[in-house]
Image (cartoon, rainbow, N blue to C red):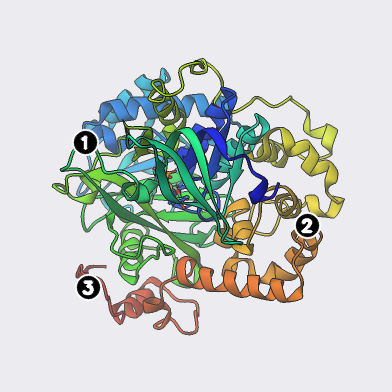
């Protein structure tokens, strides 16, 4: 439907197409409300495609006494593992216990017991050093006392957002990407009663009225409404990740460990054909409207953590496929260090505008319900859906053999595309039902997304509909010809547009998903190298950021 033909009157307008907006959108559409979601860039363009992709209780929140947050998140994790198979998948974590660093055995035992208790499952176990080393070979064995195995879960964050949006649309909601809220509209008494909406491509503006506006704009939330407490402000905190090939970091289980510099928890997480290392946690002083960038200093910090944990492994940066940074919307009084800020979400309502920010992907369903509860004074005639309703619609249990696929890819497709997975397979050519190298993405997913998922730019397709921009070497550059061939019938782009899109994608990838320039200038040939080589190379890096790094202790 053309933007100019859209209805001008709605029950609910949601600003922001990240996980928070998408969660509210799906629930509101299920309540038969006339709901519009607008996203200024692409769906999940903000933090919701740049998280660590865990569905977890957050073991470290227990250590910080945030018991309620952990309990809520563990319960949601258990629910999502049942209700979103293929999208939310179990993930085993190992935690080494060392004599000279990190929490000791009994402290971890207590934390993990509590973690299990909340989930009503006993699923952690301690292994003595030799057995633990078998589970995680390559670990530093010096002073290793053994380690724990426990269970959490993992998700493709952007695909979770897209699945929620797809389900909201199937219930009658309208969701538009590249459409922004430029201004709130008010009635004579100052109540918010609509939004000035602008379509990016055409620059057309429309005033749309509604009974309630939901501000789910994450780190941008304060642009529309100040927090209720004047001491609170949004504090954007950046967390960066490195993506390595599995050959460089050959782990089938995730590892949680302590960084030698500051004692912060770090992780190594297998993710499809890649392995993610993260994360940093620091104040974000870059332009909020640009693509967040990982700095050279953060890369060094992350590599340093690896070097201490894995002294014998060659994880030099030539094996690094990409990097990404996400920005946490944290409401803060600015009194504590980034890692001690609460990850709790907050909802506040004033005169027709509900703002929701903070929180986590994991608890998106709870956050959506909290928002919809606060709409009561404005929309009285509908009741909140039942708490026991599934977080995502159940999908008919079609056996993999019926669609001619092995079990594993079929489960994943169903998780990503819900009830549309069958359509994806039946529309595809047989040769496109094979995975793209180094990923668990089928070639056919590209064509399906191009056809059905509001792809406006190549970066939408390669960074968020599928994740080859993060997982494949050089952002998937080597696959560009086949990508074009598969998607050309659906994208209506002529030759010049394709060239522009490839250039635009290249620019975005180089600036926000490649290793930062401060490093690559010192790694010109990307030749194989050992840890001592990295150390030498890193020693020559000029850090432009504020923290000083003790490279000699690497
Ligand atoms: C490094 C990092 C790691 C994390 N890891 C995890 C994890 O493993 N597990 C977990 O549960 N949580 C994790 N989180 C937290 C989680 O990712 C965030 O809480 C969540 O993604 C925030 O979602 P959101 O929808 O509120 O914000 P966003 O995803 O940022 O969405 C807000 C959207 O609003 C849009 N917008 C802004 N202004 C306008 C406007 N004027 N008009 C229209 N649209 C607008 C933006 O473009 C953006 O897409 C992590 C966060 C970070 C930073």
Q: Is residue 213 left or right of residue 31?
A: left
Whole-angstrom CA distance, mark 3 to mark 1, is 31 Å
Rendered image: mark on residue 490: 2
Q: Is mark 1 within 8 Å of ligand 1?
A: no
Label 3 neighbourhood size at 10 Å, few (<14), some (14-19), many (20+)? few
Mark 1, Cα crowd under 10 Å, few <14 / some 14-19 / many 20+, is few
Respond yes or no on whether mark 3 lies under 8 Å from ligand 1.
no
Q: How far apart are the alpha carbons under marks 1 and 2?
A: 50 Å
Marks 3 and 1, the one that precedes in the sequence:
1
Q: Is residue 498 left or right of residue 239?
A: right
Task: Using the rendered image of the protein, determine whether residue 403 is visible from the camera's viewpoint.
Answer: yes
CB of mark 1 within 8 Å of CB of mark 2? Answer: no
Task: Residue 313 in the image: state x and y as whole percent.
Answer: 43, 63
- In this view, the residue in front, 270 or 311, is 270
Helix, strand or loop at label 3? It is helix
Q: Position of residue 305 (x, y in %)?
A: 32, 59
x 48%, y 49%: residue = 196
- Report the quarter where the C terminus lies: bottom left
Dot 1 or dot 2: first in sequence order is 1
Q: Residue at label 3?
A: 552
In the image, residue 289 sits, relative to residue 1, either above or below, namely below
Residue 457 locus on image (x, y percent): 63, 62
Residue labelled with disc 1: 64
């Amino acid at each position: 439907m053309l933007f100019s033909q859209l209805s001008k009157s709605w029950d609910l307008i949601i600003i922001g197409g990240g996980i928070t907006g998408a969660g509210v959108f799906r629930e509101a559409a299920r309540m038969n409300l006339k709901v519009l979601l607008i996203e200024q860039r692409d769906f999940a363009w903000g933090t919701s495609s740049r998280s660590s992709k865990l569905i977890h209780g957050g073991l470290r929140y227990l250590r910080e006494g945030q018991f309620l947050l952990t309990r809520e998140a563990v319960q949601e994790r258990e629910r999502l593992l049942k209700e979103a198979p293929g999208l939310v998948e179990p993930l085993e974590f190992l935690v080494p216990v060392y004599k000279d660093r990190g929490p000791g055995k009994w402290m971890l035992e207590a934390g993990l017991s509590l973690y299990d208790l909340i989930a009503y499952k006993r699923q952690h176990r301690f292994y003595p050093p030799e057995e633990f080393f078998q589970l995680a070979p390559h670990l530093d064995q010096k002073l290793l006392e053994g380690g724990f195995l426990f269970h959490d879960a993992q998700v493709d964050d952007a695909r979770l957002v897209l699945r929620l949006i797809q389900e909201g649309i199937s219930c009658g909601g309208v969701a538009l990407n590249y459409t922004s809220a430029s201004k709130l509209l008010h009635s004579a008494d100052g109540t918010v009663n609509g939004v000035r909406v602008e379509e990016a491509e055409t620059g057309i503006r429309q005033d749309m009225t509604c009974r309630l506006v939901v501000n789910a704009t994450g780190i941008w939330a304060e642009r529309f409404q100040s927090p209720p407490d004047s001491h609170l402000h949004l504090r954007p905190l950046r967390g960066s990740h490195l993506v390595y090939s599995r050959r460089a970091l050959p782990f089938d289980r995730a590892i949680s460990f302590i960084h030698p510099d500051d004692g912060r928890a770090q992780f190594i997480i297998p993710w499809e054909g890649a392995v993610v290392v993260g994360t940093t946690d620091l104040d974000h002083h870059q332009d909020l409207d640009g693509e967040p960038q990982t700095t050279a200093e953060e890369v060094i910090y992350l590599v340093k953590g690896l070097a201490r944990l894995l002294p014998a492994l060659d994880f030099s940066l030539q094996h690094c496929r990409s990097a990404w940074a996400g920005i946490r919307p944290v409401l803060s009084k600015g009194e504590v260090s980034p890692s001690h800020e609460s990850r709790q979400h907050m909802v506040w309502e004033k005169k027709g505008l509900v703002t929701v920010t903070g929180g986590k992907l994991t608890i998106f369903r709870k956050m959506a319900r909290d928002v919809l509860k606060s709409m009561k004074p404005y929309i009285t005639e509908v009741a909140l859906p039942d708490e026991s309703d599934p977080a995502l619609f159940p999908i008919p249990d079609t056996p993999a053999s019926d669609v001619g696929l092995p079990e594993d890819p079929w489960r994943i497709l169903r998780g990503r595309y819900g009830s549309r997975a069958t359509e994806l397979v039946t529309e595809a050519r047989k040769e496109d039902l094979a995975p793209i190298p180094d990923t668990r993405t089928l070639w056919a997913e590209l064509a399906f997304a191009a056809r059905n998922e509001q792809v406006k730019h190549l970066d939408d397709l390669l960074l968020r509909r599928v994740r080859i921009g993060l997982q494949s070497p050089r952002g998937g550059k080597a696959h560009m010809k086949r990508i074009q061939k598969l998607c050309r019938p659906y994208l209506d782009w002529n030759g010049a547009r394709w060239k522009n899109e490839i250039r635009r994608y290249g620019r975005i990838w180089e600036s926000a998903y490649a290793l930062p320039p401060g490093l690559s200038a010192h790694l010109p040939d990307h030749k194989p190298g050992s840890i001592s080589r990295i150390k030498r190379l890193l020693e020559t890096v000029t850090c432009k950021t504020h923290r000083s790094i003790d490279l000699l202790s690497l």
